[in-house]
Image (cartoon, rainbow, N blue to C red):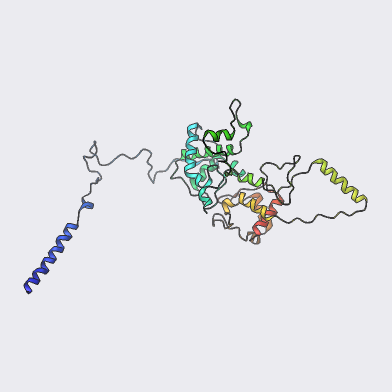
Amino acid sequence: MKVFVKRLQWWSVWGLIVAGAIGCRQDMHDQPKMIPQRGTAFFSDRRSARQQVPGTVSRSQQVEPTYLTTGMIEGAEGNAMPFPVTRTVMARGQEQFNVYCSPCHSRVGNGKGAIVQRGYFQAGNLQSSRLKDAPLGHFFNVMTHGYGAMPNYSVEIRPADRWAIAAYIRALQLSQNAQETDVPAGHPIHEMGDLLARADLPANFLENWETSVDSAVRTVPSPRAPAPSAHAAAAPGKPSGSTAAKPPAEKEKENNSSAAAQSEGQENTPPAASKADADHGKTLYEANCSPCHQSTRLGMPPVFPSLIGIVEKDGEPRIRKVVKEGIPDATPPMPPHGEFTDTDLDDLIAFLKSK
């Protein structure tokens, strides 16, 4: 009985060894592979090493800086294309913009792309006055190096395509603010309804599209400012909080009334001090400040500081100076907003003070 048990134990041991040997396959060891500097029958030239892909750049190789690769001219952002802009270039720019830029900036460039509406950081409004005046090299640099919450796309987008996108952005800006006088003579002007019908789109297809935050600001009247009349229209690009000038006839009528009141010995009652409009300040903030400092005012330190409690910390004079003059030596530089009136600054500061 003992001999039988001992033999059974040995058979169990040998069974385990055989099972282990069967399970130990050599696929990873014997897999087909190319060994450097050895020949192979796989390629017709009998070499295992392949030539590098055209355009391959070594990590240690220095690329000669040119306007095409930097977008800079003597240390400043250039405002010219490094190659001619053709229909092919514009089509490529539109394609690349829709792929890489529209998720944040939207297809019309108003900064209200799909992922921004789902909670991502506020994207820059390409239709804003600041960016409409920005040179083409600015857009190339932002795509190359990133800006704020926007990552750089130097790996994903080659330099020529970054320039094509910059050209398309400029065309997109023009298209969102185009006038009939911009159309060359001899070219037909089509109604949008006709174009929608040709594309089999409903007539209300564009109703929910917002094209420019600036336009939204101009159409939001301040409770303290009268609506612009036919004689006194607000200047294009100015926030609606700016007080419009009154017609000469109305001014003369007011002056005559004031003189008559004084001649009768009546004392003119000074107008009540107007209170700053924090709601209008919020509108100005969303259009001009939120792309960097975010709609929450939390910013993205250390690049963009938080603005919560900034008025109490720096004081109103400092805030007014920074908004009007900007901070050109900051990294990245803060642009000036010289178009803001004193009333606009009052409203903006009131919003910054609000909880």
Could you say which is closer to the camera, residue 225 or residue 238?
Answer: 225
Could you say which is closer to the camera, residue 140 or residue 100?
Answer: 100
Could you say which is closer to the camera, residue 82 or residue 355?
Answer: 355
Residue 9 locus on image (x, y percent): 12, 69
Quarter where residue 194 is shown = top right
User: As displayed, is residue 179 above or below residue 7?
Assistant: above
Q: Is 250 displayed left or right of 144 in the figure?
A: right
Residue 159 locus on image (x, y percent): 46, 40
Residue 299 locus on image (x, y percent): 56, 56
User: As displayed, is residue 175 above or below residue 302?
Assistant: above
Q: Is 220 displayed left or right of 155 in the figure?
A: right
Quarter where residue 41 is shown = top left
At 58% from the left and 42% from the top, the residue drawn is 207
Farthest-out residue, bottom:
2
Kindly tell me whether residue 96 is visible in this rendering.
yes
Q: Quadrant of the C terminus?
A: bottom right
Kindly tell me whether residue 148 is visible in this rendering.
no
Q: Quadrant of the N terminus?
A: bottom left
User: As displayed, is residue 240 above or below residue 45?
Assistant: below
Q: Is 266 displayed left or right of 324 in the figure?
A: right
Could you say which is closer to the camera, residue 328 or residue 291?
Answer: 291
Q: Is 177 displayed left or right of 198 in the figure?
A: right
Farthest-out residue, top:
186
At 69% from the left and 51% from the top, the residue drawn is 344
Residue 246 locus on image (x, y percent): 78, 43
Q: How many marks?
A: 0
At 92% from the left and 50% from the top, the residue drawn is 263
